[in-house]
Image: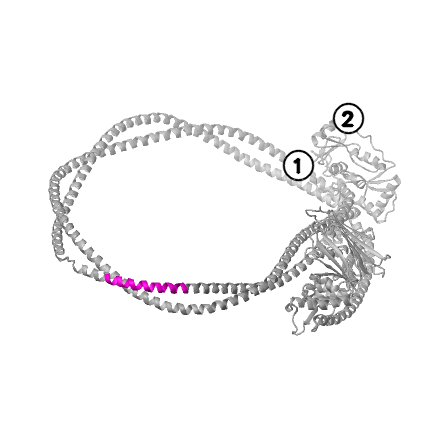
Amino acid sequence: MRLKHLELQGYKTFAAKTDFVFTGGLTAIIGPNGSGKSNVADAIQWVLGEQSFGRLRAKRSEDMIFTGSNERARMGMAQASLTLDNYDGWLPLDYGEVVITRRAYRSGENEYYLNGTRVRLRDVADLLAQSGLSKRTYTVIGQGLIDQALSLKPDERRALIEEAAGITGHQAKRATALRELAETRHNLERVQDIVGEIEPRLRYLKVQARRAEERMQVQADLDTQLRIWYGFRWHRALDGQHKARQHAQGAQTTVQARQEALQRLDEQDTDLRERYTLLRNQLGDWHRESSALHRRAEGAQRELAVGSERIRQLEARQSDLSQELEPLRERLQAQTKQVSSARATVEAGRGEIQQLEAHIRDAQARLDAIEAERGRREREISANTRLLAQLQAESAGHERRLVEQESRGHSMGEEHQRLENELAMAVNSQAELAPQVAAHQRRLAELETAGQARADHREAVRTAIEQTEAELARAGERIAGLRRQADRLHDQLELLQRLKDEGEGFSGGTRSVLRAISSGKLELAGIIGAVADQLQVPAELELAIETALGGRLQDIIVERWQDAERAIDWLKRSQGGRATFLPLETLRPSQPVKSPSGPGIVGLASDLVGSEPRLRPVVEYLLGRVVVTEDLPTARRVLDSYRQRPTVVTLDGDIVRPGGSVSGGSQSARRDQGVLARERALRELPEQIDAARGTLTDEEKARDGLRLRLQEQRGSLADVDRELAALAREQQAESAAMAGLQGRGSALEQQIEQRQRRLDAAVREQSNLAEAAEKGRHRLAALAGEMERVQSSIAASQAELDGLGTQELTAELMERRTAASVVAARFASHETILQNQQRTLNQLEQEIADKEARLAALAQERADLVTRIDDLRSQDRELLAEIGRFGQLIEPAEQELATLEAERQALITEMTEHRRQLQLEEQDNHTQALALQRAEDDVEHLRHEIEHDVGLVELEAEEGAPDQSPSPLHPVIERLPVVEMLPDGIEDDVRRLRGQYSRLGSVNPNAPEEYALAQERFEFLTNQSEDLTNAATTLEKVIEELDEVMQREFMVTFRAVAREFRDQFTRLFGGGTAQLKLTEPDDAMQSGIDIIARPPGKRVQALPLLSGGERSLTAAALILSILKVSPPPFCILDEVDAALDEANVDRFRAALREAAGETQFIVITHNRGTIEAADTIYGISMGSDSTSQALSLHLEDFDGRRELVAD
């Protein structure tokens, strides 16, 4: 089988219809980067059913379709058709040519066609699986697979050999057998667990069956004795209850009378208490106001006393201040005279000082002028002397530097020539590195773009996986909930069905008949069933219908009178109890009442209940005169509206009899309660179970779809991770290579920059040296003339300095300064005296002013106090008059309050006596009420005992007993006898029978039938266990046989590939050795595969230490070895020779030509050497409209193939 055609239209960049015709041998597809060459390999994988978009370099199905450009609109569909030559029968189809077509639409839908007929993806996958194409990872080999062949872990690398050995099909069968074996063992464990559970139950049922008959006889005897015993106790309890009620009513009447009298006294006390409180509050207000007036009067008197004392103190202080002012005024006059005398002395001294200071300033000015002139001359001489020394030193320096500069200029000429040579060499080396760095940068950019695209795709896949996992978890929770719900409903149905089969809720007679019929002991064809089993009652009416029917729910419906007679005869013979039968042939319903209507009326009970048409007489007989209402008031209204009163029952279970009696209250737990609800549940539960199981099936299908989708998504994620790892490794290698080149480039740039700086510095230094030498010669001549001029100036300045004198003027200045100092000291002393005198004068003036201000303040304060005292005396008189008025109001009010207090005290005494009497009467009432409650509790307790021990009976009050009421249990099954006196020894008989009944314990009347069913199930499960054990043994043998076959075929293929790999490695490398080695030779099926390589001229190295070219050549040797041992019909190589140099490409090309005899190769390449080996060349280019265009060239007619490729 070989590829004949590949037709693309709308696929990625191949917008126009493009047809590739593949001949035998080797076909090369070439073109620049970005032209769409690799899209050809993607298209072949896509047609063959590839579902991983990561392997197709895409993110979604829509990426397969041409996206459009500025000059060409996008397309709505992508199609690729692959034509296979099948004349050798490689594919299991009766066609010489097989055309596989795949289409993708923008909606995400994909279609598959086989020879023009639409098929499913599974059909295509199954067809390719039978030919071995679908599982071969090396049908399309890209650079990624080349890297993976070496970077895979040893246990992962064995997958390549397994595919070549063709054991993947055996592995699938083995996995299926293991799965079936696990399921078989699981089922076997479940069967054995069930068998282990059934065996104890078999023994238990056998014992229960033996005890069932014995217990039934004891129960019949006990029921007979209990009816007699409870008949006596019931009537005695009713009599005690009647007497207790009479005593309680009398005590209640006495208490009520005493409470009424006490209430009248309490009303009188309330009136007196209100009057007393009102008067006491008024008296309290008056007392508080009088106390406030007393406090104000006392405060006014205290303030009068304080004010008088304060006036006396102020008068004394005024007298003291007047006496202190007289001597102070005399001291002020004397101090003023002293200050005037001192001020005149100071003014005279200040004039003398000013005159002396004027003489000193004049002498100092003349001395300063002479000193300035001398200083200028001295500085001029000193400056000229320093200048002369500097000129002499500078002249010597210039002479020395001139010699050095001439020597340095000669050396710099030689350095300049050497630096020019080094700079030219570094520039040439840098120019050679630039193309290599640019090539690595372009490749790194391509790898970064591809890596980012893969990373984005991985993130999208990871997000999709998280969403699918979350959906799967939610689906699992829903399935678990639905399973629990279905199991719960099923358990509930089984429980209700078992209760029904056991006759739960029915009395002895009815239960005996129903059990006998269900177990086959009684063969009565005419028995239809209990009334409760034949009625369809809505849920909201169940309580009302149960109340209306009561024990009639347990009546048994039969076809004929004879059926009832036979059943009664059987009950008598078997001591099975009593039951009521309703023969259809003799049943005559009474005239039903007219169906009522109106607010609160639900309707006639017979119209509200459903049944089979033939059972309508039973419904009319039981419910034809029963009306259902919402509440008791409506029931009363309905009862009065009929001449012949019906029975009225409410939705809450209250019932009104035709005679007018009404029963109601809370519902007690009765044996027949819930029978209708149970029947309704038995009808509804199967539908609910079916609905739950249907929903569970849908959820499980949805979960399986989610699991499949999750598996595909995880596969896509693994593919993307492998692609990202390959890109990372290539990017790391490119980065390392470029970093080395960039390091060399940086070193060269630094070297060039350093040489250029040194060369520029040398040129500048040569120029500076020549210029400096010329300037130095000129400067030496100028310095000689300058030194001669400075020496002449120094001599002239020294002659002028010698003619200036300052001794006489200095002596005169010192004399005048001494006289000025004496006068200034005397002036300072007089000025200090003046300041002290002035300070004393100021203090006296301030002290006198303070005392005069204080004296005025005291006078004002005394006048204010006199005015305040007059006001206080007037206020005191007014307060005393107001206090007297309040005294006249308080005294009569206090007398009236004492009178009210005495009246209330007498009333309280009388009320206390009444309360004491009431307490005694209430205690007696409580005692009687407790006695009544105990009597009622005894009756109620006895009723529960009767219900528990006897069943549903009609309990009546004793004939003629007062306050007679209906029995606590309305349904009438059997009547308790009226027993005046107990027979002798009945209590001993009851205790004996109860003990015997208790010792027998709980038994299952259906135990024999259940035992037979359990025994049959036990035998079935035992046989099933043997079958499962045999199946497990068979599966284990199948797995062992598959393991032997896979190990044998794997080892045969491994040895063949290892031999070929050794030869191919030596051939491709031109020497060296390599081998494939099992990591676990003793366990070939679990062993990984290691690669040991030694390129020629090197030691044995680990694979990561090989260079990029060596790794690619080693991987190519491995792939070529596998292809030779297990050659596929065709193989696509996508740039696998990218990392090979020209010498390696020649050897790779020769190996490829050799392998082309067995396999049809389609090579996507840039390498000129590989192109030379091709029989057909397809050139791919990118047009101006951003679409790929193809041009084919067949080279078998050309002799100068190499020259053609070179051109």
Residue type indicated by callout 1? Lys
**Residue 185 visible in this rendered orientation of the protein:** no
Residue pictured at 50% horizontal, 67% vertical = 419
| Coordinates of residue 590 in the picture (x, y in percent) | 82, 31
**Which image quarter is the N terminus in?**
bottom right
Q: Is residue 1061 found left or right of 806 in the rendered image?
A: right
Q: Nearer the viewer, residue 442 or 1089?
A: 442
In three-dimensional space, the C-alpha distance between marks 1 and 2, rounded to whole angstroms, equals 38 Å
Give the residues in magenta.
Answer: 769-792
Q: Earlier in the sequence, mark 1 or mark 2?
A: 1
Residue 861 shown left or right of residue 949 in the figure: left
Q: Is residue 523 left or right of residue 73?
A: right
The amino acid type, in three-letter code, at marker 2 is: Arg
Q: Is residue 772 magenta?
A: yes
Q: For residue 1035, which numbered disc appears in the image?
A: none
Q: Residue at x 16, y 58 (%)?
A: 804
Q: Is residue 671 above or below residue 268?
A: below
Q: Secondary structure at mark 2?
A: loop
- Local packing at callout 2 (Cα closer than 10 Å; few below 14, some 14-19, many 20+) is few
Relative to residue 537, is residue 210 depicted above or below? below
**Residue 243 — which label?**
1
Determine which quarter of the picture holds residue 687.
Answer: top right
Q: Position of residue 109 (x, y in %)?
A: 75, 48
Q: Which mark is residue 643?
A: 2
Question: Which x, y percent locates residue 357?
Answer: 14, 49
